[in-house]
Image (spheres, rainbow, N blue to C red):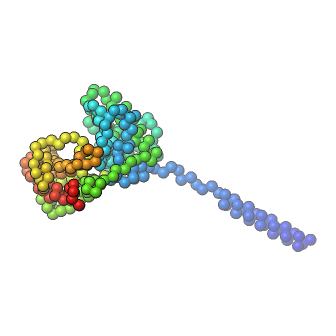
Amino acid sequence: MYPRLKFSVVTMLCALLVSGCAKTQAAPVPDSGPTPLTAADALGDFATIDYCSLLDVAEVAPGAVAVPTFEDCRAEAGARTILVGPLAFDSDPNIRPYAYPGPVPDGVAIQQSTFNDHSACTRAVTFADGTRLGLSVADNADDPASRCVIADAAVGSALAAITAHKVGRLTFPDRSWGRVAPCVLLDNHDLDTAAGPTSRPTIGLSGHSCIRGKVSFKVTVETTEPAGPAETLGGREARVRIAGAFCLIDTTQPGQGGHRELAEISVVETAGTAGDGTCALARSAATSIFPRLPAPGKP
């Protein structure tokens, strides 16, 4: 009798142990919840974003002609321009909360900007890491409501492309200026006078622009005809113009799709409006930078 009782007790203990183990193994894994969407997760490598892949032209702006640059997408239909991009991270006092009516990924905020709102409707898609994507609609019509309807449609188009993982990529041929590292060209003692001898280069978010002191340099795709008389600087045909506190110098080369790539140098006049002295510094910078840009037919 006692051996049977001993066997029964052992059996019961084993059953209880097994039951306890089974319950432990079956415990549900805690749900960590949705993951806030960062700009890197949404857009991938910032240097190769095809911003025009974020804009459904047929839906948002039928008939518009869209041109992707290295930092944005510009779509034009008559007097109306839709701009997707660029990216920004700095604080902007013009950005305000906005009740966007459509669905928004976790961690993303849609905001509006009051800057230049008499002729443009501007939205900002701000990701969980604070990086924001600008979208704007501008025209000369006295119809702000119409502009903002299109701006909201552009936001919806961008979010749809992002959530469907359909963000396109740019490719750069061997001698494209899209392959240029702008800060490398500014990290040169020839620019000490124009930029300031103690200044250091700071790369832009897209990787296609750089600022060193008073000198800025960017490479992109030309979307408007260059203004001003032509002159030769650093062995290239260039155009010099003043825009407020800046003296800007542009040069171009043939690019993809019949467009031209553009390299732009700007020097800011911190004391006020730019003048001959500011442009002298810009010309000096161009003489240093332009010869170091890749040229067609050269390695």
Q: Position of residue 58 (x, y in %)?
A: 38, 35
Comparing 213 with 239, the one in front is 239
In the current view of this chain or complex, which residue is farthest to the left?
276
Q: Quadrant of residue 109?
A: top left
Q: Position of residue 125 (x, y in %)?
A: 38, 43
How many numbered marks, from 0 up? 0
Q: Is residue 157 above or below residue 180?
A: above
In the image: residue 129, left or right of residue 77:
right
Q: Residue at x 12, y 55 (%)?
A: 235
Q: Residue at x 53, y 50 (%)?
A: 33
In the current view of this chain or complex, which residue is farthest to the front?
297
In the current view of this chain or complex, which residue is farthest to the bottom?
3
In the image: residue 235, left or right of residue 185:
left
* Quadrant position of the N terminus in the picture: bottom right
Q: Quadrant of residue 112?
A: top left
Q: Is residue 148 above or below residue 8?
A: above
Comparing 253 with 269, the one in front is 253
Q: Residue at x 70, y 60 (%)?
A: 22
Q: Quadrant of residue 202?
A: bottom left
Q: Is residue 120 visible?
A: no
